Amino acid sequence: MTAPLLTMQGVTKRFGGVQALRGVDFDLRAGEIHALLGENGAGKSTLMGVLSGVHAPDEGTVSIDGRPVRFGSPRDAQGAGIATIFQELDLAPGLDVTANLFLGRELTSGGFLSFGAMRAEAQRRLAALEMALDADTRVADLSIGQRQVVAIVKALSYADRVLIMDEPTAALTTGEVERLFGIMRRLAAKGVGIVYISHRLEEVPQIADRVTVMRDGRVVGTLPADAPQGELVRLLVGRPLDELFPPRAATTGKRLLRLAGAAYQPKRPRAGWQAPEDVTLDVHAGEIVGLAGVMGAGRTELLSALFGAGPAGRWRGTVEVDGRPADLSSIRAARRAGLAFVTDDRRGTGLMLRMAVAKNLVMSILRRISPSGLMSPGREVAAVQRSYGQFDIRPKNPAIPVGALSGGNQQKVVLAKEVLDEPRLLLLDEPTRGVDVGAKGEIYARLRELAGQGLGVLVASSEMPELIGLCDRIVVLRAGRNVAAFSGAVDEHTVLEAANGRVA
């Protein structure tokens, strides 16, 4: 075992009356990818804030190569070779890749910007990570995965010893995740130590060498990366994995959604949008039905088309809601039919981040709480209080901007907003993306409770344990068609075989 590149010992940090860190020990070796896990509020961000110079510790030491260091600012940490890539990437979308890489550190000659030199150097740095990106491309025109690469290259340009990556895969496709992992492995092979923060437990054994789990400001365990997922969950939330998922429905009610040979035909084809081609499935009252499939199988497109949120077009085949042919040509029509939809992009299309939690919650029921066109404060307060009680949204202050909430609580707001509309059928796309394990358990319990009250739920997820643990039935899509259906108790291998085309 090599000596640690980085050592943090007995680190404590208090914010007013809140003890955020309670004597934390953490270390990182050169060339190691060390996963750091914990629920929101566990102390991960504060610990990394100390390491990156954002916070000064109240007690404890930070050492690089065995020598104690103390950072007064992020620039001091960068000077020691420590860089952080946040989940919300620190990039300027309107500028090209070159400008982003040199922003604030521009190359000049004779008092003028050296555009050619900067572009050549930007292209060299991209090539060093084996990325075929054009340095003249605007960041706004890049995919999320490509932007992540630009953020890595930018960080490594001023700090190349320790790289802190906060939820780097939260918004990436499966292919982009694999490419990112390849870059991380190449960096580690060059001796860069990487702290990898994630809520996706299934990724840990794929990429990490070790994993440290935090809870309530303390380290509760450091394990090999291939430790059983159940053990990681127990450390994270203090209870076993099988307790995360509530019992499945014993009985179901009437059929709420029926698709038979259903296909959606957009008026204008959209590149990369996999239209539903030939889908047959049912969802009953009290039932949670899962949609499985590899990236591009058409899960998101099926849900968005059902909710009238896809490209303009029309349905063919049988599309019935509550036993009657349904007009799902627009969002308004879908809501009238009793459908609600939780998008997979809560920050982009699910919430108004600068608006108060209360205003976000009532967006779907404005007509109901605005008799004669005037907002009723009493009705608004009652609706907001109902949502807080049902979903345990924290902190319990509906006046703060929803963007200030943790990812898990933002997701609770998105769910609560749609449930307030009292739908009969709830469509969910990646309902726990970027959500910690504890909040996932709360969301699962609430969904099962809603199903018990007669709601039908159709959920698409890329997390196979989630589909298997939560759903009563799982329908597998491939190229816009359903190719298999299983009971919720199916094993993961069987579903993956069907998703990849090895089972008809």
Image (cartoon, grey):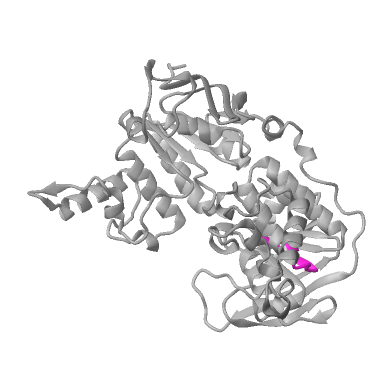
Q: Quadrant of the C terminus?
A: bottom right
Q: Which residue occupies 61% across, 37% down? A: 41
Between 211 and 214, the one nearer to me in the picture: 214
Is residue 456 depicted above or below 239 in this figure? below
Question: Quick check: can you spot residue 504?
Answer: no
Q: Position of residue 307 (x, y in %)?
A: 67, 73
Q: Which residue occupies 33% across, 45% down? A: 154
Q: For the magenta stretch, what is the residue range?
A: 419-429
Is residue 390 depicted above or below 195 in this figure? below
Left/right placement of residue 178 relative to residue 380 reads: left
Question: Quick check: can you spot residue 467?
Answer: yes
Q: Which residue occupies 61% across, 81% down? A: 265
**Labels in figure, total:** 0
Name the image quarter holding residue 431.
Answer: bottom right
Q: Position of residue 15 (x, y in %)?
A: 54, 31
> Magenta segment: does it hold 425?
yes
> Magenta segment: does it hold 431?
no
Between 395 and 312, the one nearer to me in the picture: 395
Left/right placement of residue 98 relative to residue 89 reads: left
Q: Position of residue 103 (x, y in %)?
A: 28, 49
